[in-house]
Amino acid sequence: MAEEKKSLNFIEQIIEEDLQNGYKKEELKFRFPPEPNGYLHIGHASSINLNFGLGLRYNAPVNLRFDDTNPIKEESAYVDAIRKDVEWLGFKWEKECYASDYFQQLYDWAVKLIKAGKAYVDSQTSEAMAQQKGTPTQAGTSSPYRERSVEENLELFEAMKNGKTKEGEHVLRAKIDMASPNMLMRDPVMYRTLHKPHHRTGDAWKIYPMYDWAHGESDFIEEISHSFCTLEFLPHRELYNWFLQQISTTNDFVPKQREFARRNLSHTVVSKRKLAQLVEKGIVTAWDDPRMPTISGLRRRGYTPNSIRKFAETIGVGKRENVIDMSHLEFCAREDLNKTATRVMGVLDPLKLVITNYDEAKEEWLETENNPEDEQAGTRTIPFSREIYIEKEDFREEANRKFFRLKLGKEVRLKSAYIIQANEAIKDENGEIVEVHCTYDPKSRSGSGTPESKRKVKGTLHWVSIKHAVPAEIRLYDRLFTDATPDAHKEKDFLEFINPKSLEKITGYVEPALQKAKELEHYQFQRIGYFCVDQDSSENQLIFNKTVGLRDSWAKIDK
Ligand code: ATP
Ligand code: MG
C-alpha cells in the first residue's frame, strides 16, 4: 500500500506550534487519565489512541493515570480492568500513576493556599452556596465565611483532614472571584469531607480533592506537557491555569490543557455511569457483555485491537461532538478479520441433505484453504460424507433465475467438495421440507484437476458433514438500543429504547476442527460472518459470539 500522507490534526498542530515556539521535543509528555469508576468504552478508545498515538509519533512518554479522587464510586477491580484494556489495545505506558499518590502533596499545597489567603473553609450548606453562585450574567455573593482568618482556616482544615468534622459540614474553597464571568472561578470547592475508605489509601484520608484541584496538579507533578481532555472542560481551563499559577514558580514547566470533542457511537451509550446502570439492572450480563460498547465487551464480541485502533484513527479528533454510525465500527472489524480470520464451515439453520449415490460407509477428508487472503495461513482437511447439513435458506424447490443456490433439478458446488444436483424434497405431514435428496458428480472434486472439477456452476454453498458435525451454541447479537441516539431525548430515558431482541441463542453445527477452538479465537463462518469463541466456551459446550455479518445488514434499514 502506498504511504498515506496525512495532514496534521488540530492537536498535532498545537504541538508543532509549541515545538516551533521553544518547547523541546524531550519535554513532550502525555497521559491518559481514566477515573476507575467503570470499564473503558469505545469513547475512551479515542482518547487512548490520541494520547498514546502522540507518544508514538513524538517518541514521548505517556502515563496511565488513575484519577481516583472519589472513593464512593471507585474500585480496584476497575483499575485492573482498565489496565488490561489499555494493554490489550496494544499500548505501553511509561508509568502507572494514581492521583491518590499525590494526596499529601495536594494537601500541603492547599495549606499553602490558605496561608496565602487564597483558600478558605466554608461552613455553609451546599444549598446556600449554590444560591450565592449567581448566574452567568449576575455576580455571585460572597460567603459569610470568606473572610475567615488564616489561623481559623488552618485549624478547621486540619480538623476536616483528621475526621473531626462531619460530612457536609465544611468544604475548602479557593478564594478567586465571585464576580467572574466564568462561574467555575466563583470560589470553587477544592476539598470535601468524606468518611469513606479509599481503594488505595484506606482510611488515611477523610477529605478528598475535587477534580479541578487534583487534575492539573497531577499533570504538574508528572510533568505532563499537554493535558488533553474533552470539550466540556473548556471552561475549566481558566481554573486549571489559576491553580497551577498558585503552586508553580516562574521557572517551572507548566502543563497545558487543550480540549477535543467527545466521540459518540450510534445505537448505544458511551458513559460509564449509564453503562453501569445496564449492568446493575441486569439488562446486560456484565460490563463485558458482548452487546456493550466497552472495550472488554467488544473484545468478547470478537473485535480485534487493530479494528478498534483503526476505528479511532479514521474518525480522528475534532472540535465538534458527533455521533459515529455503528456501521463504521463494524466495517473496521470486517476489514481486519477478513485478513486474519480462519475460514471454517458452520451451519446455523440446518437442512439435511442426503447424497444418494455416495457410499454410506465412505468418508473423505478434503483439503480446504484456511484463508485465501493470507497465503501463509495454509490448508486443513474437512470431512465429507453421504449426509450433510446446508442452510435451510439455501434450498428451494422452485426459484427464479436469480436464486443461485440449490433448487430441484439444478446444480451447485459444495465449497471445497463436489458439484451436487438436487433431485427430490422430502416433506413431513405439514408439508415442511425435512430432507433433500441429491446426487453428486464424483469427478468434480475441488482441486482434483479434472475437467469436471473446473466446471463452472453458479452457486457455492457451505456445509458440514452430519456425522462429524459438532453442535455449538451460537449467540447472535443485534443493536442494544433501537434508537440511534438513545440518550439524546429530553422527554425519555435512554433505558426506554432498549432493544428486547438484542440477543438470540441458537444451536448451530460446526466442523470438527473447531472442537478445540480457544477463547477469543476469530473465525469466518463462510458466507455468514465473523465469530469469536466466548470465554464460557469449552470442548463439551462450544459457544460462539457473532461479531459481525459479512455484509452490513443494517445499511438498507437505516437509509
Ligand atoms: P464517562 O462519562 O464515561 O465516565 P469520563 O470522561 O468521565 O467518561 P474518564 O474516565 O474521566 O471518563 O475519561 C478518561 C479520558 O477519556 C478523559 O480524558 C476523557 O475526556 C476521555 N473520554 C471519555 N469519554 C470519551 C469519549 N466519548 N470520546 C473521547 N474521549 C473520551
Ligand atoms: Mg467521569
Image: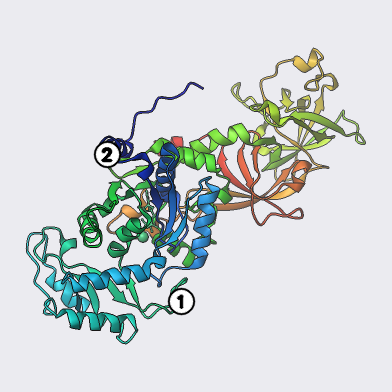
What's under tag 1, amino acid-wise? Gly
Amino acid type assigned to the residue bearing label 2 in the image = Gly
Q: Quadrant of residue 491?
A: bottom left
The residue under the point 40% across, 72% down is: 72
Residue farthest right in this picture: 361
- Which residue shows up at 73% across the image and 35% down it? 463
Q: State how many labels appear.
A: 2
- SS for dot 1: loop
Residue reaching furthest top? 451
Q: Which residue is mark 1?
A: 202
Q: Point out which mark residue 463 bears.
A: none
* Residue with the mark numbered 2: 22
Seen from the viewer's position, the closer of residues 187 and 451 is 187
Residue situated in front as seen by the camera: 488 or 1: 1
Kindly tell me whether mark 2's CB lies below 8 Å from ligand 1. Answer: no
Q: Which of the two marks, 1 or 2, is nearer to us in this view?
A: 2
Q: Secondary structure at mark 2?
A: loop
Q: Position of residue 32 (x, y in %)?
A: 41, 52
Which image quarter is the C terminus in?
top left
Farthest residue to the front: give it.
Answer: 251
By what rule are the colours in the image chosen?
rainbow
Q: Earlier in the sequence, mark 1 or mark 2?
A: 2
The percent coordinates of residue 7 (x first, y second) are 34, 28
The span from disc 1 to disc 2 (Cα, nearest Å) is: 43 Å
Residue 177 or residue 60, whichever sits in front: 60
Could you classify mark 2 by the number of other residues whose Cα lies within 10 Å: few (under 14), some (14-19), or many (20 or more)? Answer: few
Confirm or deny contact between disc 1 and disc 2 (CB under 8 A): no
Q: Which residue is painted at 36% across and 49% down in the image?
A: 485
